[in-house]
Amino acid sequence: MLRRLALAAALAFACVVAVPAIAQDTVPVAAPTAATQLQTPAQIVQGIADQLATAIDGHRDELKHNREKLISIIDEVFLPHFDLDYASILVLGQHAREATPAERERFARAFYNSITHRYAEGLLNYTRGRVKVLPFKGDLNDKRTVVRTQVVLDDGKLVSIDYAFRKSRSGDWKAYDVIIEGISYVTNYRNQVDAEIRKVGIDQLITNLETQGEKALEIMDKENREAK
């Protein structure tokens, strides 16, 4: 069960941090409306769930054999609503201060592109109604507002997946973290990235992600499990 939760969390995080790689020939996805910036975080999450179902339904066989097109759906549906720069800084943790702007940009692209490729196919199991956005309680906080959802797994069990939002400089709401059953995936990957940077350095880590992609993540995951 823990392995399934970990994969679900990684998939959710992949969705929020995918780096743009939109193909020319993509499955039609409803374009964001002009009212997007006025939406509350809960409305954004519900909109993402609806858009994703529309994009996946009826296209599973095609997408199963075309990963790049599947990734383009992630880009189109999720990317406008997530703060990639802030999320990458959180994952780098203390190393973000040590890295140059160019290194931070390279890291964000390489890391999040790798994680998206690793888990993109999990989206093929998504169907309308799997995500239930729970009623929002409390006041909106510009620095951290959490939208709580429940996701139905194949066996009918419910998993709590929450999305942390913050208000961007432009005034719209952007998500930056996914928390599944209380486990933050920003924190989880920050620990793995920290260990890898201490071992090989940030430049080598970035190079590994750029050249090995998802394999580099698998190695990091394995080393993290063995270290515990």
Image (spheres, rainbow, N blue to C red):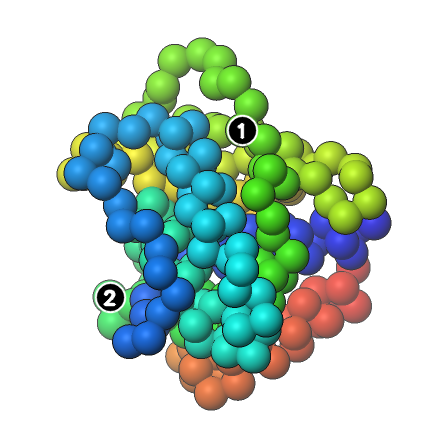
Q: Amino acid at mark 2?
A: Pro
Residue at x 73% of width, y 45% of height: 153
Residue positioned 53% across, 60% down in the render: 58
* Percent position of residue 141, x then y: 35, 22
- Residue 43 is situated, as x and y percent measured from the top left of the image, at 39, 29
Looking at the rendered structure, which numbered label has been put on residue 118?
A: none
Pick whichever of labels 2 and 1 is earlier in the sequence.
2
User: Can residue 177 be seen by looking at this rendering?
Assistant: yes
Residue 159 against residue 111 in the figure, above or below: above
Residue at left offset 38%, top offset 52%: 77
Against 182, residue 207 (above or below) is below
Q: Nearer the viewer, residue 204 or 88?
A: 88
According to the picture, the residue beneath numbered tag 2 turns out to be 101
Q: Which residue in the structure is indicated by mark 1? A: 133
Q: Is residue 192 left or right of residue 105?
A: right
Q: Residues within 10 Å of mark 2 (few under 14, many from 20)?
A: few
